[in-house]
Every structure is written in C-alpha cells, then in structure tokens.
Amino acid sequence: MCLEMSVVIEDNEKERVMYTPQPHQQMFHLSDLPNLLALGTRGTGKSLSLRWDAIIRCFMFPGFRALILRRQITDLRKSHLIDMEQEAKALGVKYRDTLHDVKLPNGSIIQFAHCEDARALDDYLSSQWDYIGFDELSTFTLDQFLKISAAARTIKGKPYKALVRACSNPLGPGAAWMKEWFVDREVDYGEFQDYNPDDFGMIFSTLEDNKYVSRKEYEARLKILPDHVRRAWLLGEFVLEGVYFSDFRRKTDEGKPWHVVPTLPTWKGEPLQNCAWVSVFRAIDWGYFPDPAVCLWIAVLPNNHAIVFKEHKWLRSLAKDVALDIKRMSEGLHIIETYCDPTMYIKTGANEYSIGETFEINGIPLTASENDRMMYGYAIHEQLNTIIDEHPQLQIVEGQGGSNSGWGCTDLVRTLPIMQMDRKDPRKLGDGDDHWVVALAYYCMGRATPSRDPQNPVQHRWMMPKKQPADLMVA
C-alpha cells in the first residue's frame, strides 16, 4: 500500500503532500487483520489515520465501498466532515455535503454516517461495505458494533477482503467491552462461541508517537479535567467511568501481582493443591437461561488469606445436575460451607422441592446468603483492601479460556473490574454481567473461618496451664 500521497495543485503546479503516516499509523495501514483498533491517548492522529486508511483504499481499488461512523451526527460534523470537504477538493473528488459522502471517479465511495438511535442502526443491517470504520469506538455499545460489523462483506473474487477498523481513547461507556474484545481478547465464550481472538488486534500510541503535537501544551490543557479523564487521555489508561470496584488492581505500579495471581499460591513452600487440609468454601449464584448458574471455590489459608481458585458455570442445566457436578468437581477438597443465592429456597410452580432443597438432597448442603446490592459491594471492598502478610486478603487465580476450563477464574477476573455503580444509588452495585461477582459477594458476606495448619495446631486458652502466683513459685 502506498503510504504517502502527493497531490498536484493545478493553480501553481506544485506538489503538496497531504498525508504522511508516522510509524504507528503505518502499522495501522499495513495490517490485514479483519478487526483492528487504533487505541491511544488524545492527540495521536487516530481519526486522521482512520479517514486516510479509507481514502487510500478507495483510490487503490475501483468500486471500493467504505463507511466511517461516529456515534452522533454532531461529532461527525465537528471532525471528519470539516476536513473531508477540503481534502476532497484538493484530491479532485466530489464531496456531497447533503449526503455526507465522497465519490471517486473510479466508482469508489466513502460514506460518513452516525448511529444515534435504533432507527439509525437499522439502516446498516441490510447494507454491504468493503470497509467499516468506527471513530471513537468506546462510545458505541457492543450490540451496535457487532450488528454493524456484520455488514462488512466483500464480493467473491475481489483483490481484497472486508475490513473493520476502529480508533478510540480508553475512556467511554463502551471501554469495558472494547478492552475485552481488542486488548485482552478474552470474551464470554458461552455467549460468543464464534469469537476468534486471532481476528482482533490493537495498535497503541501515545503523544510521544506524534511528532506534530507538543506534550507540554497538551498537558496544560488537561489540568482542569477530572483525574480519571487525564489518566485516560494523557496516559492511555483504561479508566471505566462509573466503575464500582475502582480499588481492584491486577498488579501494583511496580508490576507485582496484587488482586490477580497467575498460579495457586503456596503455604510455607508447599503447593496449595497438595494441602488437603486447607479449608475450601463455595459460593453459588443461581441461574438457568439466559442467566447462568455460577459456582466459585475459595481456599482460606490459616492467616485468613482467601484465594478464589476455581469457577464453573452452567446454562440450561437442572438443579440436580448442577449439584452433582459441583459435588464431583469438589472431590478431594476440604469443603467447609457453601453460600448461595437465597432465592434458591423459593418454591415455584408444581415442584415438590425448591432448588436449594434439591441441592441438599443431592449432597450439597447450603447456607443462604442475603440479596443486598449495597452489602455486596461493601463486603468485597473490605477484602480487596485488607492487607495480610503484604498481600490483599482476597486474591483471584487467573484462568485461561473462560469458565469451565479448569483451575483459574477467567470470568471473575473479567467482570469484577467492569461492574458499574447503580445509576440511582452509587452505594449499590449495578446490574449487568454480575453472576461471578454476586457469587463472590455471597462468600465475602459469610463468616468463613481460616484453615488450621496441622503442623502448628492451635492451643486454645482453656487448654493452657494456669500461671502460679509469683509468691508461690519455688526458687
């Protein structure tokens, strides 16, 4: 692909270079990934890269159809449409202001559009584009992205494949799903079974990558903004607005694992999986469909350090089958107690037994927790911020491949940092993909007792010999 375009201005017959991509922009243009995100701080030329990526391809391939979207028409008018009118004139192509499109002599077209509401979304469902570009992707919902991206289809025999391109800074209502799909590339495979992480990628850039921007001047303009906005726009941090567990940290600033650990910890040098005496607690949030049933396994060490080391979920599974699965997956573990969703004891329909009673009949005794979304958050916050032996009291073993993959808790690690506050009451945990977090809350609200190390048995006070008065002691 040609990465520098020269345009001859007929007035003075001098060449003027309209666009020269910098290294991070070149990587964006050269990638052949089906879905690619240009992510970075403000002022790195992401929107410019997106627009010129479409322009270059339209000149290269006759009949090429490109769609560039902003969330709102007002944002579109303030960005691409202002620049495109001047660029079209210099390029000698036709820009139609009323239709917000550019038509090239070779039959290619660039359509600029928005997606403010459901009606606007419907306009793209039956269309077909060789190239779809989302500007400020974090302002779109996942549903909008998936439905519109489905319109990226290319006729068989063309010398190119359909592409989806996007650019964004890491701040906005869609930052959480954008991070899952393009950065971490870890999604809920139960819901998105066809997701292929190899089809998604990200190119990150900061102000240092743009030689045309003064960092000093840019920092001065950001001083009046809230701290979380400055961190996102200046440092490129993913700071989710309205996030409930803002105290959750995967790692410390020095890179030390904090709330998330890569493997099961040890106890006095012994691998935890070899310590059959360690107390294990379970926590269940019940669901059938579309909400899943979720179970967590938590080991509590003698120093009260809690390790969430396993998770599992079920969809469309009967209570008896889930109970038997949990019993089977707990073999060899020193199970102490299982906290559960209190609604499991509500009888519905003509069933003789409640879900909770069915569990107990099948070998899973339960302790009903409370449904209190304010207490959910407080209980988890307390364990996230209590320090024991230079570690947070609560740590989660990171898994690979999603729920049901064995050791580790991929979905808990995925959902905990993106949980939102309740819009009406920020003290409460908001609704959402909260099944793993709610199960964790049931555990944190319980009265889990620490394990007893058999090598260091606890000697209760009543077992200790009484001290003799000093005046009765023999010298």
Image: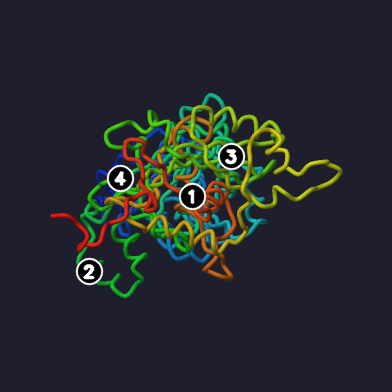
Taking the spot 30% from the left edge, 45% from the top edge, the residue there is 257
Judge by depth and name the residue closer to the eye, 107 or 74: 74
Instruction: Find numbered disc 2 in the image and state the secondary structure of the residue it sits on.
Output: helix
The residue pinned by badge 1 equals 448
- Distance from Cα at disc 4 to Cα at disc 3: 38 Å
Cα separation between marks 2 and 4: 35 Å
Q: Nearer the viewer, mark 2 or mark 4?
A: 4
Question: Which badge, 4 or 3, comes first in the chain's sequence?
Answer: 3
Q: Dot 4: few (<14), some (14–19), or many (≥20) neighbours within 10 Å?
A: some
Q: Position of residue 107 (x, y in %)?
A: 52, 41
Q: Residues within 10 Å of mark 3 (few under 14, many from 20)?
A: some
Q: Nearer the viewer, mark 3 or mark 1?
A: 1
Pointer 4 residue = 257
Tag 4 near tag 3, CB within 8 Å: no
Q: Which mark is residue 150?
A: 3
Label located before the other in sequence (1 or 2): 2
Name the secondary structure under disc 1. Answer: loop
> Which comes before the other along the chain, label 3 or label 1?
3
Q: Amino acid at mark 2?
A: Glu
Q: CA distance from mark 1 to mark 2?
A: 53 Å
Q: Hey, what amino acid is under mark 3?
A: Ala
- Per the rendering, the mark at residue 217 is 2
Residue 10 visible in image: no
